[in-house]
Every structure is written in C-alpha cells, then in structure tokens.
Amino acid sequence: MANTKNTKNVAMHWFRKGLRLQDNPALLHALETAKKSDEGRLYPVYVMDGDCYQLKHCSALKANFLVECLIDLDKSLKDVGSRLYVVSGDPTKELPALWEDWDVTHLTFEADETGEPYAKARDESVMNLCEEKGIEVESFCSETIFPLGDYVKKSGGLAKVPATMGKFQGIFGKMGKVPKPLNAPTKEDFKPIIDKEQAKETKGKMLPPKRATDLPWPRDTPKADATPIWGPKDCKNLTPITRGGESKAQESLSKSMAKAAWVAGFEKPKTSCTSLAPSTTSISPYMSVGCLSPRTVWHAISNAVAQAPASAPKSKPPVSLHGQMLWRDFNNLIAHSANQDNPGSWGKMEGNKYCREVPWSENERFLTAWKNGETGYPWIDACMKQLETEGWIHHLGRHAVACFLTRGDLWQSWEGGALHFEGQLLDADYALNGFNWLWLSCSGFFYQYFRCYSPVAFQKKNDPHGHYIKKWVPALKNMPAKYIYEPWKAPASVQQTAGVKIGKDYPLPIVDHALESKENMNRMKEAYAAYKAGGSKAPSPTKKKTP
Ligand code: FAD
C-alpha cells in the first residue's frame, strides 16, 4: 500500500549486511521502484546501530573495518551519482524520522534469514512501522547461495533439514543451477532519479564518518589499556589482514582466483595454518558484511576451475573452495533451523536443539589467560595474538584454540569463546561462529571427543622452527627450535641465552595438557552418557581446581 500523499515513488534502500552494489537485488529493486515514477528518488541509508550483531561486541579493529566498508560504499555510490546516508542510533527511531523528512514510500532491505534475535526483533518493528505509515516494504535474500527458505522446502520441511554436511550436499545438488550474480547499477541506471535538490535536502544528515568517535561503539572497549583507533588513516599501524569495502573485496577475490590451478586443487585441510601470509582466500571478513555475495564467489571459483590446466588436480566438496561455500550455506541453514525451532536458541547451549549440554566449569583466570594469549602454550598464544592484532586466524588455528579452551585443556564453555571471537574476528558471523564452536567443543555435529589437538605436537611438524610463534610471541623470538613449542623445558642456560625467563617474561603452562586432556575426555564421556540416558539435561558443573 503506497503512501497516498505522494504521487512519486521515494524509495529507501536500508543497508545492513550486503554492503555492496554488485548482486544486490534489494538495492536494484529500490532503484527500479524509484524509476517507475517521474520524479522518483532513491536514498541509500546505513544506520550505525551499536546493538546490532556487527557492533555490539566490537574491537576497534573491527569497527574500523566497518567504517572502511561504508566509506568505500559511499564512494561507489558517488561514482554512479548517488551517495550513502549514514545516521547513528536505533533504526526504529532513525528510519521513521528520515521517512518523514523525505516522504519515503518504499523500503527495501536484505533479509536476515538466520533468525538472529536482535535482527529479527528490529526488522519486525521496522516492518510494523512501515505498515502504520503506509510504506511498502520488500526484503530479498542474497546472503546465501540460495535463500534458506528454499533449502527448507527442498528438504521437505523444517523437521527434515539435513544435520550433516553430506546430506546438505544432497539437498544442494537438487537446487538447480546457481544463479549468476546481478550486475552493479551504473551511472546510466541512476540517471533518471538524480536531481540537484537531493543534495540540499540532506544538509545536516550525517555522511560516512572519517573519524567515528561520535558513534555508539565500541560498547566494550577491547582492553583497558587499548586506545580505540578510528578511521582508516589511524589504523595504518595495525596492519590488518584486509581493508574494508567492496572494491577491496573484489581485488582480494580476483587475486585468489587468478591462481586457477590453486583454486581447482584447493583442499582446506592441506592449507597451512602457520604460514605468515594467509594460505586460504581470506575473503571471510568481506563475506561476513556482504561486500561480496556468495553467488559472486561461487561463479568466480567456477571460472577459475574452468581455466585451470586440464592436468591440474581437481578437488571436490567438502574440502574444495566450492565446498567452503557449501559449509557456509549449511551453517546458515542450521542456525535458521535452530531459531525456527526455539527462537534465539542458536549461539547458546541451553535450548539449542543441535547442542549437547556439557557441564563446563567457570574459571575467569583460565578464560582471561586464553583471551590474552597467556596460556604458556606458545602455539595457542600465537594464534590468540594474531586474532587480537589482525582480527583473523587460519581455520586450523581456530580449531586449536577452540579445542584448547573447551574439551581439550581448560574445560570452559564454548559460549565464552564464541563471544570473544564475535568481538575480535573481522569475519565474525552469527551462523558460522556458532556452528564451528559446537563442532570444536564436540557439543554438536562432531562427536569424536577422544581425538584431541595437542597444543605442542599439532604444529611441530608443519613449522618445526616456530616461525609463526616467533612472529606473534616476540618474547620467544630467540628460543631455539628444540624448545619453541615447550619453552618451560628449556634449561636455565638456554633461557638465559634466549633472553627470556619462563615464568617471568613468558608464562609457565596454565595446565598440564597430558593430564587435563585425559581427564576432560572422561568428563566428556560422562556428559555423553548423561545425554544418552536423559536427553540434553546437563549434569551439575564440574568443580575445577585452579592451579
Ligand atoms: P576459505 O577457506 O578461503 O573459504 C572461503 C569462504 O568459505 C570463507 O570466507 C567462508 O565464508 C566460507 N568458509 C570457510 N570455512 C568455513 C567453515 N568451516 N564453515 C563455514 N564456512 C566456511 N568463519 C567466519 O566467516 N566467521 C566466523 O565467525 C567464524 N568463526 C569460527 C569459529 C571457529 C571456532 C572455527 C573453528 C571456525 C570459524 N569460522 C568462521 C570458519 C573458518 O575458520 C573461516 O570461515 C575461514 O577460516 C575464513 O578464512 P578464508 O576466507 O580464507 O576461508
């Protein structure tokens, strides 16, 4: 039902995820709507909302990444004759004020299909407000290869949504061809709706920030002694692994895809997690805010594979690059399914149909040492330092630290680990983070708790000299290779020559891995037995001594 006061179509596209022009059906629909009437207009808008998933638990690095994405988006919109309008605050208050100012008749946005509780409540409120004000609202799904609802239908209903990757691959195989990504709108496309008045009207409305000190985040300052750093210029010294924005995302994707034989033969488990440069595509930060659409990535992979020499080895899902994109859709579908079953249960242990309850203990000292990279296990600490500095770690590094925190060594709940990742990872993603933490803690999808990563042996064979450790844990930079994974075993004379005193300049191991991992396997066995006997009720928490 269009606003009766207006004869012209005034469309607003509300960016949330999907921070891109390419393959953005909601933006294109808003543009087409605006063009349908003589004096139509389009307002692309982003609301800086400190309560949304991307910003609620947010390191300065991550906030910077988002600001960079918005600046880049604004630039791309300016190149086609438009611009991005950014306001700060609660979307249910800020959007209606803009609708009023601009006589908005139509609203489009990218749907959040996972059922993430804040996004769900926010979108329902905004849609109700639209109904009250007679604004036509339409949402679109392009954050997964196929809309999640279509996977559910193809599965035969919610109850039959596949819970294993193998079965998901079966459903995916029945979905038909992956649609080609939609082209980004051009200057020509925007021409009919650009008018000079538009610039005047927005006087006083905030535009993408150069510095973001007046914005509502970060809510949690990352560390007491850390100065929040805002704006791309100030971020220079942080050497983050990626710079934000669709144009950088396209560059990064093209760079990876140019290595056609590498793409064709990609096998995730064989990529190195100790290499100093990423050994995988490292597009995940872009995927998490939608600077790249999954259909764009899918077809880029297909093209690269087609260009690879016929003699080059070809990998297949689930380990291939196409396979990684399937994992992503599968994780999203599972989050959707959990939240449909019990709203808001995804990302939690209790009430989550995919999660076995385990009586984790609570030990603040353990959790803090893990977060700060001060466990005394150099490989674990190096990963946590990379996370803090770059907002990214290789998948197997994530495996190691997640296992160490939960069922491996410290017996702390995966929920605390997932929350820390949410704040620190540039690629933090509601569905993927939750899924992988369930997997690594053996709470869901993977149940071989008797297979445990050793924080010592795991990487020794891949990086015998510990180059990765020496980069991220400088206290150990002169430690000989023989002791780099177990520096507490180095004799005093070796420590002295290396210029480090273990226990003073670098911590002693927080627990004895050999003992704790064994004990934890027994605890896991008990938790599984309790689950089998009585459903998902957790036994009372383990009393864990603090050494
Ligand atoms: P590539 O191997 O190049 O894969 C390309 C893309 O495929 C990725 O960008 C990602 O979108 C998708 N993908 C890759 N691996 C996985 C996977 N295991 N599950 C689902 N999708 C995948 N990834 C996130 O994007 N956000 C998270 O919050 C996140 N949390 C994680 C938490 C834990 C404990 C673990 C073990 C893994 C987590 N991952 C998460 C999954 C994975 O580690 C990253 O997606 C991957 O390392 C990103 O690097 P890349 O872009 O080079 O991946």
Image (tube, rainbow, N blue to C red):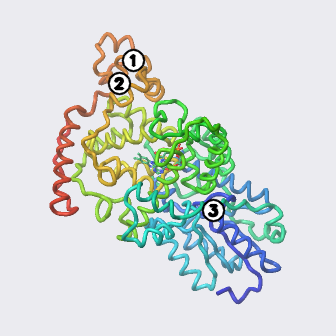
Q: Is residue 356 left or right of residue 170?
A: left
Find residue 303 and name its label: none
Q: Secondary structure at mark 2?
A: loop
Instruction: Determine which residue is flagged by label 3.
Output: 179
Q: What amino acid does circle 3 point to?
A: Pro
**Which corner quadrant of the image does residue 26 belong to?**
bottom right
* Quarter that holds the N terminus: bottom right
Q: Position of residue 316 (x, y in %)?
A: 50, 46
- Vertical order, 28 against 323 (above or below): below
In the image, 299 versus 309, the foreground residue is: 309
* Quarter that holds the C terminus: top left
Q: What amino acid does circle 1 point to?
A: Ala
Instruction: Determine which residue is flagged by label 2.
Output: 485
Q: What's the residue at 37%, 60% (across, down)?
A: 163
For the residues labelled 3 and 2, the Cα–Cα distance comes to 48 Å
**Which corner quadrant of the image does residue 197 belong to?**
bottom right
